[in-house]
Image (cartoon, rainbow, N blue to C red):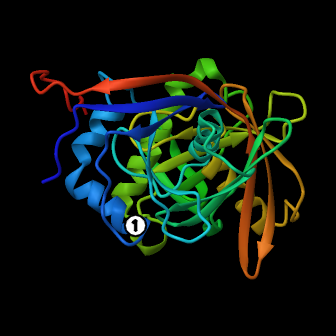
Amino acid sequence: MDPQPKEMEVIDSHTGGEPTRIVLSGWPQPPGKNMAERREYLIQHHDHLRQAVVCEPKGHNAIIGGLITPPVHAGSEAGIIFFNDVGYLDMCGHGLIGLAETFRFLGRITEKHLVFDTPVGRASAEIGEDGKITITNVPSYVYREGVEIDVPNLGRIRGDIAYGGNWFFLVETPLGELRFNNLDFLMSSSKAIRQALHEAGITGADHKMVDHIEFYGPPTVRGADSKNFVLCPGNAYDRSCCGTGTSAKMACLHAKGKLELSKLWTQESITGSIFEGWLEKQGDRIIPHIRSSAHVVSRSTLYFDPNDEFCWGIE
């Protein structure tokens, strides 16, 4: 059994309002020849560490954590495994931007183009002269269009299932509903939709759970193309535009002939922050690019006292 840490050093940042907590030291490195194997090791042996790092009392349900590992592939800067209060993510767009900003803050970069290994493939981050960071995400695509489902108290809901690094059900929302002061309704309705999808056995490819719900509608910020609200796995919403959600949204638009390759798409979040995105094609794959800024907000040490009844978090 791996030794239990007494402390961990972490750096907190936010990307468009959404927090990221990167573990710098103190977490025993998981074995595995690839990132999927390393993530599975965390699930089987280190899940209490996930809870301790991001759940209360050391964290809260909006934090996305990230564990840095040695790279898998030659030319990669590092490996990264993202996790939240209820489990582990395939990818995290805002988190990758936060990771790149953390590396810049620490002076760990020797060039402005960084490649990272994730459990679902390689992704990269480019640090611009203006301070903004552009990530190149894993391939994104539409899995099923026009899926209809009956949801208690909401009626029949129609949406698209798409992959942007995580699985999404995207639902168009009427004008006026995507307001920050309407969070209670957005949270309850998105959770009801997710539950209905689960109970109906509606999944992504390979029976993967559709654990993100994305509402979209008209923007309220000048120059934006759309506004969104994203329910993350668990009971938190994304304060940012959601990098993987924006990737899924652009993939849907392109599949429907509404977004050309290389055309800039400007996404507004429920909090009013902005992501810029565009698509390119590599062979038969659609590759999203997302650009935004991240800001480091703290560097701290988490302590693990075995006499603390909540040492390993409250989940």
SS of the residue at dot 1?
A: helix
Residue 148 lies, with reference to residue 180, above or below; the image says below
Residue 162 seen by the camera: no
Residue located at (43% from left, 39% from top): 24
In the picture of the structure, the residue carrying the numbered disc 1 is 36
Residue located at (65% from left, 65% from top): 140
Residue located at (88% from left, 61% from top): 262
Residue 224 seen by the camera: yes
254 horizontally vs 75: left or right: right
Q: In the picture, residue 222 is in which quadrant?
A: top right
Relative image position of residue 97 (x, y in whole percent): 64, 43
Q: Residue furthest left?
A: 307
Relative image position of residue 274 (x, y in whole percent): 76, 34
Relative image position of residue 52 (x, y in whole percent): 27, 33
Q: Residue furthest top?
A: 181
Front-most of residues 220 and 298: 298
Quadrant location of the N terminus in the rendered image: bottom left
